[in-house]
Amino acid sequence: MKNVKNWKTGIYAILIVVSVFYFIPLIMTFLYSFKTDQEVLTKTALQMPDKLNFANFKDAVEKLAYIRSFINSFVITFFSVGLSVLLSAMAGFGIARGNSRRFTFIFMIFVGGLLIPYQAVFVPTYLVAVKLSMTNSFWGIIFFYVAGQMPFSVFMMTGFMRNLSQEIESAARIDGCSILEIFFHIVLPLLKPAAVTLAVLRSLIIWNDYLLPKLFLQKRDMQTLTVRIANMFGQYRYSMNTAFAAIILASLPILLFFIFNQKHIEKGIAAGAVKG
């Protein structure tokens, strides 16, 4: 019994140390965002500012072109995630309900896509986008985001779909419902925990992505928040407080989205753990 307590104490100690190292950069970002230019130079990273300087956030909104950049990031994230969740749910439904080896083969193709590193296909993807004139286009980058997300999304949705009872679907078929009616009115509502979990995970990745928007969207009025912030660290390298305030402003929307959907995420993870 004593050994078990010592083991748990050691685990908790390790988790506390890891948490401290994880939160230090977040605390530094928060403190820097409220410091004046003078305090950035004279105070250490973890020292509190003399007073909260909200002028940094006003400057960040102006230099970041926040409204325009926010809309760009929102449009790309919303449509990329929405299409990815819908298409992967439909694919998962077809694969899970298919009874032939053909569907198993299709599923294995998607699983194989998980083994391909993102960096290995990035250059060919960009060359294809240039050839098809899909750069400097929101729909172009959305298309590649959706395509890149499909392997994991289909894998996740198929796993949840295989654990759903087919009794309601069978009853709906007897009543004369079409396959689309069964999917949209019966199956899709049952997939809500999995869909929300997938949407949050994919949103975090797309919202914070830098490389794809940087290369695909070269027009200034199409730049996302992450690209604008990276430019600020170069252009306004002596105004670190303004740049860190911009990071806070860019992180806030996706953080709120995560908080408001936390219950659905917990349900999705719990369902996957119990049924999977």
Image (spheres, grey):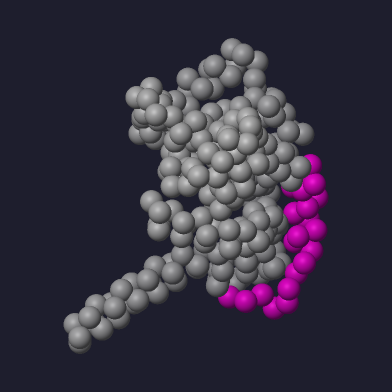
Q: Which quarter of the rendering shows the N terminus?
A: bottom left
- Tell me: 10 left or right of 171: left
Decide which of 216, 15 is in the foreground and name it: 15
Task: Report which quarter residue 162 is drawn in.
Answer: top left
Placement of 29 over or under 122, stated as above or below: below
Task: Report which quarter residue 133 is drawn in.
Answer: top right
Residue 228, can we see it? no
Residue at the bottom extreme, as displayed: 2
Placement of 212 over or under 228, stated as above or below: above
The magenta span reads 47-69
Task: Report which quarter residue 76 is drawn in.
Answer: top right
Q: Residue at x 69, y 55 (%)?
A: 253
Question: How many labels sit on residues?
Answer: 0
The percent coordinates of residue 261 (x first, y second) are 62, 58
Residue at the front extreme, as displayed: 174
Placement of 215 over or under 209, stated as above or below: above
Q: Residue at x 66, y 75 (%)?
A: 49
Decide which of 266, 63 is in the foreground and name it: 266
Decide which of 109, 123 is in the foreground and name it: 109
The percent coordinates of residue 260 (x first, y second) are 66, 61
The percent coordinates of residue 241 (x first, y second) are 67, 60
Q: Residue at x 40, y 57 (%)?
A: 273
Q: Would you say the magenta stretch is mainly helix, strand or loop? A: helix
Placement of 128 over or under 227, stated as above or below: above
The percent coordinates of residue 262 (x first, y second) are 58, 62
Decide which of 155, 26 is in the foreground and name it: 155
Residue 270, can we see it? yes
Residue 79 magenta-drawn?
no
Q: Residue at x 38, y 22 (%)?
A: 102
